[in-house]
Image (cartoon, helix red, strand yellow):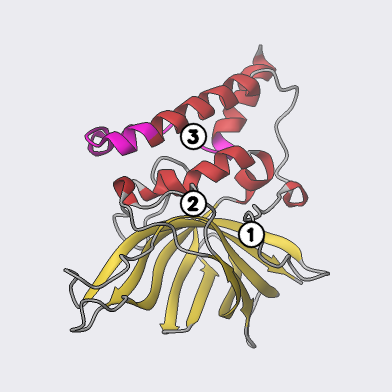
Amino acid sequence: MRSSLWAASVLCATALSAPTYSTSAAARPVEMRVLSGYFQLLGRKIQDGKNMAQAPVCNMNNAVMPIASPTPLPPPSTGLTLKHVAIGRGTQNYSCQANETAAPVALGAVATLYNASCVASIYPDLLSMLPNVALQFELTDIDQATLSLSNLAISGHHYFSNLTTPIFNLKTTAMDLGFATCAKNNSVAAPAGEPTGQDDESFGAVTWLKLLTRGGATGNLKEVYRVNTAGGKPPTTCAGMPTTFEVEYAAEYWFYAS
């Protein structure tokens, strides 16, 4: 009995603890559906954990990055190893000019990153749900300590230095995993069925990406992937849109190092 209770507690602490329910989410049916699936799976994991003989091991070698279908991104380069997995929660940013028939212009993104490495290695099915779950709850600020509906701790920030240069700063008071400016190497459309937006907005999910780090990256960071995207895509035209606007998004980020 002691070992089963201990295993169940390790499951919650290592992956996703049973969170405090949000009354704001309860008011919206899409969020209710997303959260219902999340809690059902979490409950099954806790029940399974009661039968574990020992605590699950956080081994990054067991983590397998999702593959887009039908067109996958190029795989990580030979010799690289997975260093970190994070859930990013933030906004994709856009601008519109006077022409309402034109497509919005991307201005980059801003996101807070949360450490999901152990979830990726032990509970990949839970990990795959996290972007959509996270999308339903807005951050209180960019330094929010943990991701809503989980105990995933902040592991860094993502932003752009200009329109084409994404930056990942994986330095926090708890850890220093590196800093990298990146350039896009490849992209593919998000697979059909990916969450289209907050409260089921119909804009769609942003593309999956492979990024290469530029010179000066620290922590031996070499490649970054954005996968399992939820939301973030703008409307097809600027009709009715302000000069600048944000679209909420979440995604998994996989960091590979030499």
Which residue corresponds to mark 2?
153
From the viewer's side, name the closer residue of 217 and 26.
26
Q: Dividing the picture into quarters, in which one does residue 238 lie?
A: bottom left
Distance from the alpha carbon under mark 3 to that under mark 2:
12 Å
Q: Dividing the picture into quarters, in which one does residue 258 lie?
A: bottom right
The disc, 3 or 1, on the residue closer to the chain's N-terminal end is 3
Can residue 178 be seen here? The reply is: no
x, y percentage for residue 35?
Answer: 39, 34
Q: Dividing the picture into quarters, in which one does residue 100 lie?
A: bottom left
Q: Secondary structure at mark 3?
A: loop
Q: Secondary structure at mark 2?
A: loop
Can residue 96 be seen here? The reply is: yes
Three-letter code, disc 3: Ser
Three-letter code, disc 2: Ala
The answer to whether the residue labelled 3 contacts the one labelled 2, judged by CB atoms less than 8 Å apart, is no
Which residue corresponds to mark 3?
17
Magenta run includes residue 18 = yes
x, y percentage for residue 96?
Answer: 24, 79
Say above or below: 181 vs 157: below
Say above or below: 178 vs 25: below
Q: Give the number of the mark in front: 2 or 1.
A: 1
Which residue corresponds to mark 1?
84
User: Which segment is the magenta one?
Assistant: 13-33
Residue furthest toward the right?
79
Q: Secondary structure at mark 1?
A: strand
